[in-house]
Amino acid sequence: MLRHLGDDYNPTRRCEIAEYMNLHSEEFEEFLADVFAENGDTTSNIRYRIIDMIDLLNDKLATMVVELAIIDQDPKVRLQGLQAGYRTRVDSLNDQVLQILNDRDGEFQARKWAVHILASTDSKRYGRVLRHMARNSSEDVNLRKEAVYGLTKIEDSESIGALCALLGDSEVEIRQSGAWALSTIGSPDSVNCLLAALEDDDELVRDWAIRGLRDMNDSHALQGLADVMRNTVPDEQVRMIRLLVEKRSEIILRAIAELLTSSETDVRRSAAWAMGVSPYPPAAASLETLLNDSDEQVCNYAKKALLILGRGDPTDFGLSL
């Protein structure tokens, strides 16, 4: 084994070396025990090479390598072992992985990969652990964000509830992550909390909430968005129009069409532009009114939208499609 993995190691022969390991498993197991029992640069390099080939080993040997790697004294070996465990979905070591996660004094990267291993191999069993970590304000905010990501793999009512609760967190990054996670899951059970998030002070939280509600294909979600768009401040109306126009929903397009009569130039301009992106025939009368608008851009957008609706000839407006 040392001949294959020592100073003469050739990475282009990974498949060949791994095949030899699989065919001589007893010899390889003895070699592993020796290599992981020693310290030093030489043995560390060998451990790195073994872990690098883990995807080519049989399940028994792969599990053995991961088990030895995640308790190794070398932080780099431990990290590579955890990453290998994540890639190969080794779940028989989850109790040890949980210990790594629960070590508050452990390195962030190791705990991060522990989160992803537990979430990807047995998310139902470890959902409570991930929910607790996501809500724990005394934890590193970046680790909490990793736990939030893990919760997107579960999608049960408890996890939806935990993510909704995060929308009220004092840390803006956690609120952003929670809104992103809920938009990724797209559960109708999160409609009300995402609607509430539309009042968040942070723009990114609001954006993820809008995207999540937009993409649900849920009438309650779309009606909620339409109601908020009608009643919010002009700057927010402009942002919502641009985020929602391509939904091509009757509910949304009707709300945008109503904004064609806004007293705010930027809102009229965005609404007229939107009618050209997603044509809405009932808006034709309001668009015709805008042909005489005091703002040139509003007029041009209205002309283009009417042309798309088949109302008029491009030459009449001095425009071409």
Image (tube, grey):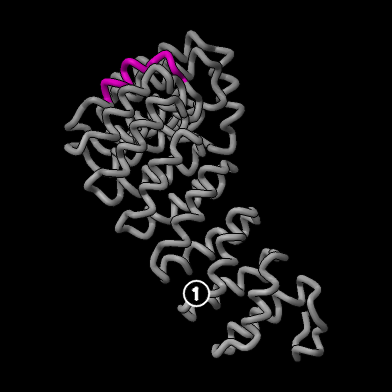
Q: Residues in magenta? A: 90-100
Determine whether, in the image, residue 250 is placed left or right of residue 199. right
Compared to 97, does 187 lie above or below?
below
* Mark 1 surroundings within 10 Å by alpha-carbon count, few (fewer than 14), some (14 through 19), many (20 or more): some
Instruction: Give 76 or 292, whichever is nearer the viewer.
Output: 292
Instruction: Give 271 or 153, whichever is nearer the viewer.
Output: 271
Determine whether, in the image, residue 215 is placed left or right of residue 125. right
Write the residue at 50% across / 51% down.
Answer: 211
Q: x and y percent of residue 71 in the render?
A: 29, 22
Q: Is residue 11 magenta?
A: no
Q: x and y percent of residue 283 in the render?
A: 66, 68
Q: Is residue 93 magenta?
A: yes
Q: x and y percent of residue 138 in the render?
A: 17, 37
Q: Secondary structure at mark 1?
A: loop
Find disc 1 in the rendering and name its residue: 262
Write the residue at 30% across / 45% down.
Answer: 174
Q: Quadrant of the C terminus?
A: bottom right
